[in-house]
Image (cartoon, rainbow, N blue to C red):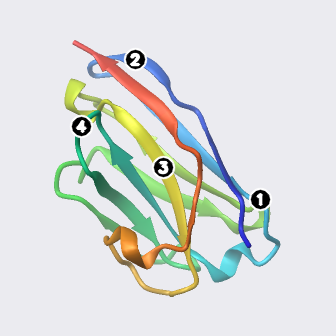
Amino acid sequence: QVQLVESGGGLVQAGGSLRLSCAASRRTFSSYAMAWFRQAPGKERDFVAAINWSGSRTLYADSVKGRFTISRANAKNTVYLQMNSLKPEDTAVYYCAATRLDLLVSSTARYNYWGQGTQVTVSS
């Protein structure tokens, strides 16, 4: 079992930045590929970004490419999402997810563990 706890959400003006963190409970954190998803009210949970075990490969949704950066610190059991140039349409609950597959996948079905989410609100 892996427990994931997100933090760093909040209210920010359009054009601003936030950095989300996701702390994992398991010492074998480096054996999990990690991802961020987001879900706006009344919408499906959408893929945002993923990173492989070592952090050498990443994958981004087109909507965030060039603005968001996913990274990880395996020694700290933590994955990050740096979000720059935020837009009102980025407003959502952001979820951290983990999978034992060392693959970059965008489907929610491939992820076994989920955090509780952190709210990000971008005002115009």
**Residue 114 or residue 50, whichever sits in front:** 114
Answer with mark 3 or mark 2, whichever residue precedes in sequence: 2
Task: Say left or right for 77 vs 93.
Answer: right
Tell which tag, 3 or 2, sits nearer the viewer.
Answer: 3
- Count every numbered label the image shows and give the total: 4
- The reply to whether callout 4 and callout 1 are in contact (CB within 8 Å) is no
Answer with mark 3 or mark 1, whichever residue precedes in sequence: 1
Kind of residue sitting beneath label 3: Tyr
Answer with mark 1 or mark 2, whichever residue precedes in sequence: 2
Residue positioned 39% across, 54% down in the render: 37
Residue positioned 36% across, 47% down in the render: 38
Residue 42, labelled with which disc?
A: 4
- Determine the secondary structure under disc 4: loop
- The reply to whether callout 3 and callout 1 are in contact (CB within 8 Å) is no
Tell which tag, 3 or 1, sits nearer the viewer.
Answer: 3
Answer with mark 2 or mark 4, whichever residue precedes in sequence: 2
| 91 shown above or below 26 | above
- Determine the secondary structure under disc 3: strand
| 4 shown above or below 109 | above
Q: Quadrant of residue 75?
A: bottom right
Task: Say left or right for 43 vs 104.
Answer: left
Q: Is residue 58 visible?
A: no
- Circle 4 packing at 10 Å, graded few (<14), some (14-19), many (20+), is few
- Determine the secondary structure under disc 1: helix
Mark 3 and mark 1: Cα distance apart in space = 19 Å
Residue 95, labelled with which disc?
A: 3
